[in-house]
Amino acid sequence: MTEPTKRARQADRDAVTNRLEQGYADGQLDRVEWESRTNRALSAKTLADLHGLVDDLQVDEDDDLQPLVRPQRRRWLIGVVAAIVIAGAFGVRALTQENDPAPQRADRSTVTAPEIDAAPEVDSQPEVEPEPATEEIPEPLTYKAFQAFVKAYRDRFDTTVLYEPRFYDNGNVHFSVPYGPVGKNRIDGMFWDAKNGFDDWTDPETNTFHIGLVDLAKVDFKALARNVVHARKYLNVDNPEVSVSIERDPDLRPQVRVEFYVSNDFSESASMTTTLSGRQLSSSPFVVEGR
């Protein structure tokens, strides 16, 4: 059993930061919470410090990362103490009943029911209908945000196939759909966000650049969300804005890839490419020239 007062190893800190990344990727933590907890994890001294950072997070059933501190012993001790207290309470009650005389029953013939005043008249107020609950908008580029778009797109178009979607840090998604007769090779540019839904982005046009169709059903969005966190953290761009596109290129293998683009206000940029399953194919972090 791992004791919470034990000193933390670097491997323990790494395990917690990985779980925090997963919590941010699947929408349990927003960016501020993730950054704050990660900084605290990196400077944690004991296992108790680390456990408090992930104790409230849900974990996938297939997650092989076990809790750092197991509280079963403390729960067992609390249960024993509670049992002793309850038993003692019953014992005190039994002794009290033996020493005290039996309570006297009231003579029902001498009890008079109190008079009840008439209830005051209350002006009737119109019922106020509760406001409809607003649906929570997920943090952009998280697993919940990706799933929200896939569901909305499938409900609207009755398919998961579309032309090269691009997901942005502000929650917008740009993509194209087929337009008109199939033989004309026309596309209609659209965008979507969780608050406003779908709208046109550009007028219908010929698919001059031969943008390829991709199938959202073939994308591992949990892996994609984890790679968004990785791109923010390891591509060496401060205060980054991230965009993710799913692209098809018949001249490459595999033909369909996920492209991550990272940039900031200082014109610093980097990129990363993965497969639809999340396996990294290439990475180009930002490098300061002259170093």
Image (cartoon, rainbow, N blue to C red):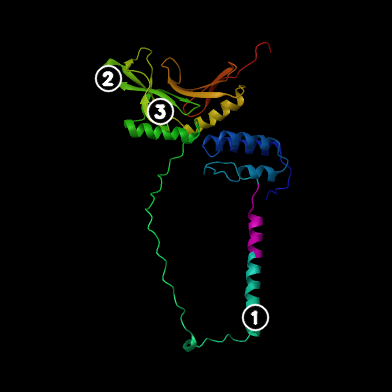
Q: Quadrant of residue 176?
A: top left
State which tag comes first along the sequence, 3 or 2: 2
Q: Which residue is mark 1?
A: 96
Residue 220, given in percent of the width and then of the height, sits at: 46, 32
Magenta residues (range) = 69-81
In the image, is residue 3 part of the stretch drawn in magenta? no
Disc 3, SS: strand
Number of other residues with Cα within 10 Å of mark 1, as a class: few under 14, some 14 to 19, many 20 or more:
few
The span from disc 3 to disc 2 (Cα, nearest Å) is: 24 Å
Q: Which residue is mark 3?
A: 192
Q: Mark 3 touching mark 1, by CB under 8 A?
A: no
State which tag comes first along the sequence, 2 or 1: 1
Q: Is residue 290 left or right of residue 59?
A: right
Q: Quadrant of residue 268?
A: top right
Which amino acid, by three-letter code, is at mark 2? Val
The span from disc 2 to disc 1 (Cα, nearest Å) is: 90 Å
Q: Is residue 89 above or below residue 272?
A: below
Q: Nearer the viewer, residue 4 or 157?
A: 157
Q: Which residue is mark 2?
A: 182
Q: Is residue 178 left or right of residue 116?
A: left
Q: Residue at x 66, y 84 (%)?
A: 99
In the image, is residue 72 part of the stretch drawn in magenta? yes
